[in-house]
Structures are given as structure tokens and as C-alpha cells.
Image (tube, rainbow, N blue to C red):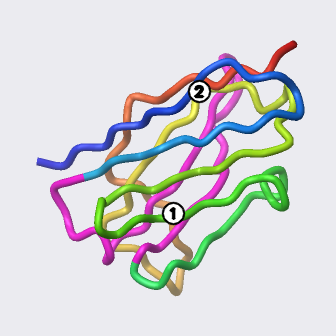
């Protein structure tokens, strides 16, 4: 059984930092792609960042570049999203998702197979 569990959300002031964790199990971690997505009520879900744990390659949306860092601990089957210089517009529910067999030719993290329940990040003073 595949499990995807996010943690680390909370309230942080603008300019602050937060680290999200995504613990996964039930599949071959280093053959997958794992992504972070976020959604604000009433808006479409957007991709934030993606990592392929097998080679450690990270991918970022324009809004995340330079502020967020994605990493993986392959011994723990866990992916982290370190978020810095947070802005109020980063407020959203953040979801972790797994792509079991990424297609590197067509792009990774574009067809996710399993999703977590999400963790709320609120950036506010």
C-alpha cells in the first residue's frame, strides 16, 4: 500500500522559513518522482517543485526558484521542501504527490499517481 504523508505546515511571518516533509512508502523510492503542489481555495492547483530521488535532480516553478529548495533523504524515503523568504501569496495547502514511473522524455511530475492529504501553510503577520 502506497502512503504519502505531509507534515511541517503552520503559521509563519512574511520573510520567514518553513520546512515541509513528505514521508512515503509502498513503492521504489529512487525510481519515482515526487512533487510538491499547492492550492488556494477557488484557484487551480499549481506545481511548486519536483525531485527525482534516484539522481537528486530538482525542478522548480518560477515562483519557487531562488526561495525554495527540494531535497530527499533516500534512507528515510522522505522528501523535504525548505521554504525561505516566504510571502503572503505562498499561503496555501501544500500537497505531496508521487509519480511512480516518471517519463523523463515527456517531463516529470506531470502525471501523479498518489497524493497526500495536504498541510496548510499560512504566511501572515
Vertical arrangement, residue 73 with respect to residue 18, above or below: below
* Percent coordinates x, y for residue 19 in the rendering: 60, 42
The tag on residue 109 is 1
Q: Are marks 1 and 2 in contact (CB under 8 Å)?
A: no
Residue drawn where x is 11% and y is 48% of the image: 1
* Percent coordinates x, y for residue 107 in the rendering: 56, 75
Helix, strand or loop at disc 1?
loop
The Cα atoms of the two marked residues, 1 and 2, are separated by: 18 Å
Q: As drawn, is 30 to the left or to the right of 64? A: left
Q: Tell which circle, 1 or 2, labels the residue nearer the N-terminal end.
A: 2
Q: As drawn, is 85 to the left or to the right of 4? A: right
- Mark 2 = which residue? 93
Residue range highlighted in magenta: 25-53
Vertical arrangement, residue 111 with respect to residue 115, above or below: below
The tag on residue 13 is none
Residue drawn where x is 61% and y is 21% of the image: 10
Query: In the rendered picture of this protein, how many numbered marks are placed on residues?
Result: 2
Closer mark to the observer between disc 1 and disc 2? 2
Quadrant of the snapshot with the C terminus: top right
Residue 117 on the magenta span:
no
Residue drawn where x is 43% and y is 67% of the image: 33
Amino acid at each position: 500500500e502506497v502512503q504519502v504523508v505531509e507534515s511541517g505546515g503552520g503559521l509563519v511571518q512574511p520573510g520567514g522559513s518553513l520546512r515541509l516533509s513528505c514521508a512515503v512508502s509502498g513503492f521504489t523510492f529512487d525510481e519515482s518522482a515526487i512533487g510538491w503542489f499547492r492550492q488556494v481555495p477557488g484557484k487551480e492547483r499549481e506545481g511548486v517543485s519536483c525531485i527525482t530521488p534516484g539522481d537528486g535532480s530538482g525542478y522548480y516553478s518560477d515562483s519557487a526558484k531562488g526561495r525554495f529548495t527540494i531535497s530527499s533523504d533516500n534512507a528515510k524515503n522522505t522528501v523535504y521542501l525548505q521554504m525561505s523568504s516566504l510571502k503572503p501569496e505562498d499561503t496555501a495547502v501544500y500537497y505531496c504527490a508521487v509519480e511512480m514511473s516518471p517519463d523523463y522524455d515527456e517531463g516529470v511530475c506531470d502525471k501523479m499517481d498518489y497524493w497526500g492529504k495536504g498541510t496548510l501553510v499560512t504566511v501572515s503577520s
